[in-house]
Image: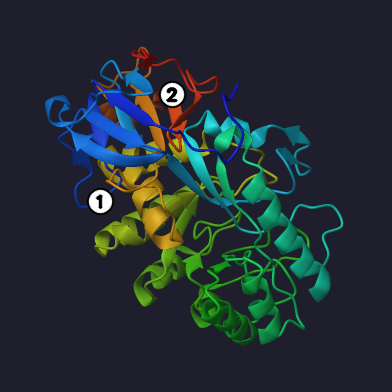
């Protein structure tokens, strides 16, 4: 069970010592030479060797016992409704379950599964503002869910985007899930959203829910949204030549999701790596959806892309953390002084064939999560969803 459920931050000092492997979340330097992290009031204040860090007067001290520490994972593509419940799968506590998969932050791609979702302009705006407000105040297990992502509909004007931004809405739901599907019409609304500081994501591939449509590479390029949503399809992917076209023809974020075509996921990932553009790759689950709810979806994507994408696991972890934080303009995702203290502590799963955590992930195994920290607060201990880890961190003070 999660140990906290609100937006509160740790007051005082948190010290995590005896870290065996410190993953930074940054592609350019994915592993840090450090064994200690100190946070105060929910933010990182020191990273280094124990002898070089001020660890005195800690309110909470965690002995990592040689476990790895990484930034909290970020799910770039979720579809919340209200509370910790999804009517799409009639499941409670799905967000809390993602916490046990190491996810500390989620980004809504639209609250599309609300029964009777309004499609008139007034209703679209009201739902987005309500979702934004609700998830700002309610954080299941402490997970930060950036919600309030309106699905754009015909009839919306520039003033509507101005109103949404003034109310605190910062996202657009997947372009193409509503009545706006043509590239030229989407381009205008995406431009209005961008003008008022709202980030956009476009649906890619075949239809996924009633009312959505097929969005091909030409439409994606014309609309020019900030994130190419589920480039590997949700569920049905574009042909490989169109996926390559999108990787080659623009500089927008390349989002690869669990609830998509795995072959297309590998094709997009390999193409981005071949082009020297791994900094564009971010990961999501695209859930809850018809495929279900995947609490370990981000970990599974990391293992898939590392093992079959022939890429060091530490680089794929960066795609799921630092890359997403940068492209989504989030505070976490990187182990760096001044950043929010969101961490996942994990180790090689018991009996994995891998020699250590990174090697086990490279061989396709999931790690065992021993603890998750959000805003400097321990939100859960040993995960109820991952395989048991060889070593488990411990609160010693």
Is residue 166 visible from the viewing direction of this image?
yes
Q: Quick one: which residue is furthest to the right in this view?
A: 116
Quadrant of res 161: bottom right
Is residue 83 shown left or right of residue 116? left
| Image spot of residue 120 (x, y percent) | 83, 73
| Image spot of residue 223 (x, y percent) | 54, 79
Quadrant that contains the C terminus: top left
Instruction: Determine whether 363 is above or below 241 in the image.
Output: above
Q: Which residue is mark 2?
A: 371
Decide which of 265, 321 is in the foreground and name it: 321
Number of residues whose C-alpha sits closer than 10 Å to that of mark 2, classed few (under 14), some (14–19) or many (20 or more): many
The Cα atoms of the two marked residues, 2 and 1, are separated by 24 Å
Number of residues whose C-alpha sits closer than 10 Å to that of mark 1, classed few (under 14), some (14–19) or many (20 or more): some
User: Does dot 1 land on a helix, a strand or a loop?
Assistant: loop
Decide which of 193, 164 is in the foreground and name it: 164
Q: Which of the colour schemes (rainbow, by chain, secondary structure, one colour) is used?
A: rainbow
Kindly identify which numbered label has been placed on residue 27.
1
């Amino acid at each position: 069970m999660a140990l906290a459920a609100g937006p509160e931050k740790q007051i005082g000092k948190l010290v995590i010592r005896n870290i065996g492997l410190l993953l930074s979340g940054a592609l350019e330097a994915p592993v840090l030479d450090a064994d200690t992290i100190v946070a105060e009031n929910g933010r990182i204040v020191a990273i280094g060797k124990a002898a070089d860090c001020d660890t005195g007067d800690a309110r909470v001290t965690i002995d990592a016992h040689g476990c790895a520490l990484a930034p909290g994972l970020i799910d770039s593509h979720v579809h919340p409704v209200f509370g910790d419940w999804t009517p799409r799968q009639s499941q409670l506590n799905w967000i809390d379950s993602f916490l046990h998969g190491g996810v500390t932050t989620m980004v809504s791609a639209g609250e599309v599964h609300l029964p009777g979702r309004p499609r008139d302009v007034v209703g679209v705006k009201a739902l987005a503002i309500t979702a934004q407000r609700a998830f700002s105040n309610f954080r299941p297990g402490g997970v930060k869910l950036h919600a309030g992502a309106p699905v754009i509909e015909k009839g919306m004007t520039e003033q509507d985007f101005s109103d949404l931004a003034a109310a605190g809405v910062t996202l657009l739901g997947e372009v193409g899930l509503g009545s706006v599907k043509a590239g030229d019409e989407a381009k205008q609304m995406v431009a209005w959203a961008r003008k008022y500081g709202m980030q956009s994501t476009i649906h890619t591939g075949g239809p996924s829910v009633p009312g959505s449509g097929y969005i091909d590479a030409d439409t994606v390029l014309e609309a020019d949204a900030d994130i190419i949503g589920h480039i590997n399809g949700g569920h049905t992917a574009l042909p490989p030549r169109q996926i390559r076209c999108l990787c080659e023809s623009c500089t927008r974020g390349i989002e690869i999701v669990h609830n998509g075509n795995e072959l297309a996921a590998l094709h997009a990932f390999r193409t981005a790596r071949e082009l020297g553009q791994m900094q564009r790759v971010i990961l999501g689950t695209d859930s809850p959806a018809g495929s279900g709810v995947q609490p370990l979806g981000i970990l599974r994507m990391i293992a898939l892309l590392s093992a079959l994408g022939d890429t060091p696991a530490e680089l794929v972890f960066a795609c799921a953390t630092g890359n997403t934080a940068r492209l989504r303009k989030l505070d976490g995702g990187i182990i760096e002084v001044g950043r929010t203290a969101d961490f996942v502590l994990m180790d090689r799963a018991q009996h994995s064939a891998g020699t250590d955590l990174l090697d086990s992930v490279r061989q396709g195994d999931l790690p065992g999560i021993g603890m998750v920290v959000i805003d400097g607060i321990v939100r859960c201990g040993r995960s109820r969803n991952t395989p048991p880890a060889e070593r488990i961190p411990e609160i010693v003070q």
